[in-house]
Amino acid sequence: GQNIDQPTEMTATEGAIVQINCTYQTSGFNGLFWYQQHAGEAPTFLSYNVLDGLEEKGRFSSFLSRSKGYSYLLLKELQMKDSASYLCAVRDDNGATNKLIFGTGTLLAVQP
Amino acid sequence: EPEVTQTPSHQVTQMGQEVILRCVPISNHLYFYWYRQILGQKVEFLVSFYNNEISEKSEIFDDQFSVERPDGSNFTLKIRSTKLEDSAMYFCASSEVGDYNSPLHFGNGTRLTVT
């Protein structure tokens, strides 16, 4: 089966750092992706990991441990506009489709 | 930056009616997808399409659903006889290649309301 778990909600303060965790148990694995989704809008791509370790991209970093089935998204210097849902998604290793399987998302509220 | 476009942005239909949701993927992309998101729930995979045929479909994608790429640019999702539970946001997505580093790019979605 496919199981991707994230906390439902988180709250953080403007200017702070927040870490959003994701654990997964999937039948195949070909990369882990993070997306941001504002209410009523499309998911937008933030980062991906396929090898273990940390990938940094400006204020956003993402970490992967394949042996633990674990990833996190780190957001630094939080801004009010970062209030959104953050979606963890695993890419299937079925080469015919390469679909992403999404977790339920973490709704982040950034407070002043 | 190229983007995936979807029309209409909002569609209201009566139960039992047919609807067609339209998408124009990014022009050099090869893989196309439909996802849906029921309000307050997660983004769910419906179907993937590659090389002019369905490559995978989920349990949600039953006989009431079909996809088509009628020309070189459009990609459509048809629901033959809509049900109340089909009410959701439908996202089209495309990706350049199927490698691990090729993200899916999503359109802005069509909000389907079945009454």
Image (spheres, rainbow, N blue to C red):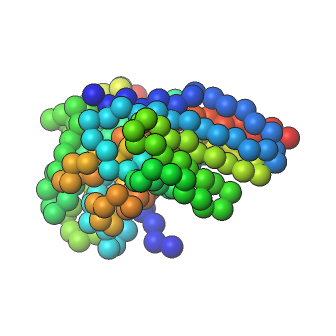
- Where is A80 relative to B113, above or below? below
Residue at horizontal 50 percent and vertical 51 percent from the top:
A53
* Image quadrant where residue B49 sits: bottom left
**Where is residue B99 shown, x and y percent of the image?**
30, 61
Q: Is residue A88 visible?
A: no
* Image quadrant where residue B22 sits: bottom left
Quadrant of the drawing holding the C terminus of chain A:
top right
Residue at horizontal 67 percent and vertical 31 percent from the top:
A10
**Where is residue B27 shown, x and y percent of the image?**
34, 72
Q: Which of B44 and B79 lies nearest the eye of the viewer?
A: B44
Q: Residue furthest right?
A: A112
Residue at horizontal 46 percent and vertical 72 percent from the top:
B2
Residue at horizontal 21 percent and vertical 41 percent from the top:
B57
**Where is residue B30 shown, x and y percent of the image?**
26, 66
Left or right: B66 in relation to B105: left
Left or right: A28 in relation to A108: left
Q: Which of A66 and B36 lies nearest the eye of the viewer?
A: A66
Quadrant of the drawing holding the N terminus of chain A:
top left
Left or right: B104 in relation to B64: right
Q: Is residue B57 visible?
A: yes
* Image quadrant where residue A69 sits: top left
